[in-house]
Amino acid sequence: MEEPNQARAGAPGEAAVGRPDEAADGASAEAGGERPELSFGLGAESELLTLTPEGLYCPPADLYIDPWRPVHRAVVTHAHADHARPGSGGYVVSESSQGLMRRRLGAEAVLEPLPFGAEQRFGSVRLSLHPAGHVLGSAQVRLEANGVVVVISGDYKREADRSCEPFEVVPCDVFLTEATFALPVFSWEPTEATARRVLAWWRENAAAGRTSLLLAYALGKAQRLLAELRALERAGEELPASREVVTHGAVEGLTAIYRQGGIEMLPTVSVAQVEKGSEGFAGRLVVAPPSAFGSPWARRFRPLRSGFASGWMRLRGNRRRRGYDAGFVLSDHADWRGLLSTVAETGARRVLTTHGYSEVLARALRHRGLDATALRAPGLRAEGAATEGAGVEIGAGGGGSASGAAE
């Protein structure tokens, strides 16, 4: 993961403290000892959302969305550790994310599962969850009160993905969108095309007796690739003789949860199981999180070729600088065109951008005539710090590891 740039203070259109359209208001709140808040939604008389030190808070519903600190009730968009943090009193989650949330948050966490599209009242607010297409069970949060609809996207993508529910456009008045890959250079090719590149690379390595070490984020990306490769096999593509994929422990446990959710993928086997046998790793495809690259754990696979699947592989020179033999452009976030088209399809009259290149996206939307503002707060990733979900590998026992970026 590249070092994040320092967030710029006071950049045009960036809301720091106060209302988004008055970024300077309340900028000295800390001097008076007051909690900084950023309010938007229904107006001064009845705010639907405020931005607090704990994260996005909905006062009339008395709950937080993806809070950065433990709170009494959290609505969590998906199971990556930069969104799902342990310690809160209760968690409203999508029904299909329960297995992943339980692994992430622990056995003691109080989960309140909600089916996609089902509406639940919290105070005067009607809340519902809708598919975000990021990973299995990932959700957008829809809040409605007094005829005003606000949608918080969470992380999302628009590309086809056999391993999770497809993104659903939710019409709204205010749309809070991520901006992780909000630069024109980020443009994704069809998922199947990337999967075919991975398969060709695996075949080439297998023919030479080498192990293919494919680095992919343990939650979401790894399962997406396994599902795509299985789809190619079903379509008649020939896989190497050792079609059973070897997985890192962090990947294997999460993959089992995906299988329980009905996701069809290539068969997998843990590294430990292979080592107990006599087959060895030559010609095998090994899927591991990025943190495994260059570690003593990876030495057992030599001779090997390494490949990294990430949206960051779109940037020229990234593969070479990071030392990978191959790079595959594949992201679980929306690309530039996907972000722009999604905003347009929601029909939102106001847009708030968070994470990554938030000001770039807000500026582009203002040029298109929209009321758009970039949010800045301690818990939001700054421009240049987009990481496809930093530090969200989920290991055994539900603990998160910050040792590698994961989406």
Image (tube, grey):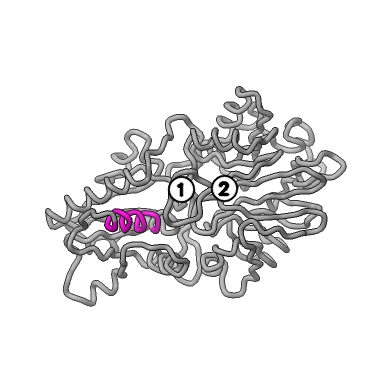
Q: Position of residue 211 (x, y in %)?
A: 20, 58
Q: Is residue 362 left or right of residue 166?
A: right
Q: Residue at x 24, y 55 (%)?
A: 236
Task: Find the residue positioned furthest to the left.
Answer: 208
Q: Residue at x 72, y 34 (%)?
A: 20
Q: Which residues are magenta?
A: 223-234
Q: Is residue 207 magenta?
A: no
From the image, give the main secondary structure of the stretch colored magenta. helix
Q: Is residue 224 magenta?
A: yes
Q: Position of residue 7 (x, y in %)?
A: 58, 36
Query: Circle 1 sits on which residue?
Result: 332
Closer to the observer: label 1 or label 2? 2
Question: Distance of mark 1 from mark 2, alpha carbons?
Answer: 15 Å
Identify which amino acid the numbered label 2 is placed on.
Glu
Q: Is residue 349 left or right of residue 235?
A: right
Q: Position of residue 300 (x, y in %)?
A: 22, 64
Position above or below: 83 against 365: below
Query: Circle 2 sits on which residue?
Result: 168
Q: Is residue 249 left or right of residue 296?
A: right
Q: Quadrant of residue 255?
A: bottom left
Q: Does residue 30 appear in the picture of this structure?
A: no
Comes first in the chain, label 1 or label 2: 2
Q: Position of residue 161 (x, y in %)?
A: 43, 51
Which class describes the residues within 10 Å of circle 2: few (<14), some (14-19), or many (20+)? some
